[in-house]
Amino acid sequence: MSEVKSISRTPPAEVRRRLRAEVGFGCPMCGSPHLEYHHFNPTWAEQKHHDQQGMIALCAVHHAAADSGAFTNDQLLSLKQANHASVQSSFQWRRKHTVLACGGNYAYRCGSMLRVGGIDVVYFEKDDSECDTLSLNIYDICMNRIFAMRMNDWMARINVDDIEAPPSARTLVFKSAIHQVDIRIEFKDRRMLNPDEQAISAEFGIPTEENVVFCFFTGKMPAPVPVKFNERNIKFGGMTLEGSRMAGCGVGIQVG
């Protein structure tokens, strides 16, 4: 007799994306983009399935409420829609030592990683505790700002293909084919760094006994000039930059 393969409670990636898009990438109860996936018709206990019609994306708080029976199936069905025009949240990763990793290039204590035509696209600002915070300005091809982050607080428009911000609040994915934008942000503390990244931290003179966080920024954007942040390099304006170390400078990369 052949074994029946067990089904993971985590839905497949495409099902998760469709469920996020269905509610406008934010919990329909509170708008939080940190979503989990609730099985309600039937429940997971009744039948292990990933049928989108019987599932809904909710934040952790409202997922727990739904699991406890707070909502009827009809109420959950009525919530399967977007009731907001944007989503917003914040990264809690704040350290006095922060390294920004962009396409195989690393910046430490640089005011701006990328400035294009006088516009700071990727840059750092200090908070009241003198910790580094990340700020971003992401524009579509028509120079409309569709994603903005200021001192780790971010807001995104929802007329896009995907916004994925897991409850851990350590990563963020923002994608829109029509806007030609695809970005990923990931934070790692010292415990998560590989030996090469630990060596880069040492190159910058960061004491091994002190906390450090690496912020990885990859993807592409079309404006103010087309830029691609690959794993190994940055491509912009017909130029390629890789393997650079930037420290203590006002601007790491300036175009125009």
Image (spheres, rainbow, N blue to C red):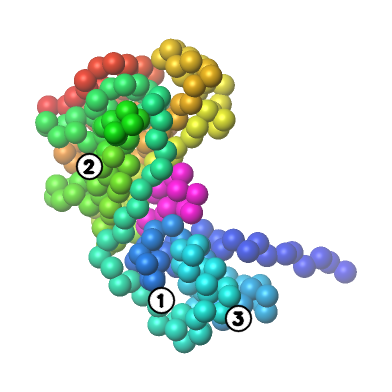
The picture quadrant where one finds residue 68 is: bottom right
Crowdedness of circle 1 by 10 Å Cα count: few (<14), some, many (20+)? many
- In what element is the residue under mark 2? strand
Crowdedness of circle 2 by 10 Å Cα count: few (<14), some, many (20+)? some
- Label 2 – label 3 distance at C-alpha: 42 Å
Disc 2 or 3, which lies upstream in sequence? Answer: 3
Q: Position of residue 237 (x, y in %)?
A: 20, 29
Magenta run includes residue 240: no
Q: Is residue 5 above or below residue 240?
A: below
Residue type of the residue flagged with mark 1:
Lys
- Label 1 – label 3 distance at C-alpha: 16 Å
At x 36%, y 17%, the residue is: 245
The quadrant the N terminus occupies is bottom right
Circles 2 and 3 in contact, beta carbons < 8 Å: no
Q: Mark 2 points at which residue?
A: 137
- Label 1 – label 2 distance at C-alpha: 30 Å
Q: Which mark is residue 42?
A: 3
The picture quadrant where one finds residue 45 is: bottom right
Q: Where is residue 8 in the image (x, y as percent from the top left)?
A: 65, 62
Q: Mark 1 points at which residue?
A: 80
- In what element is the residue under mark 1? loop
Magenta run includes residue 164: yes
Which stretch appears magenta?
162-173
Q: Where is residue 146 in the image (x, y as percent from the top left)?
A: 22, 52
Q: Is residue 58 left or right of residue 250?
A: right
Q: Where is residue 64 in the image (x, y as percent from the top left)?
A: 54, 68
Q: Is residue 147 above or below residue 253?
A: below
Residue type of the residue flagged with mark 3:
Pro
Q: Which of 107 and 205 is in front in this view?
A: 205
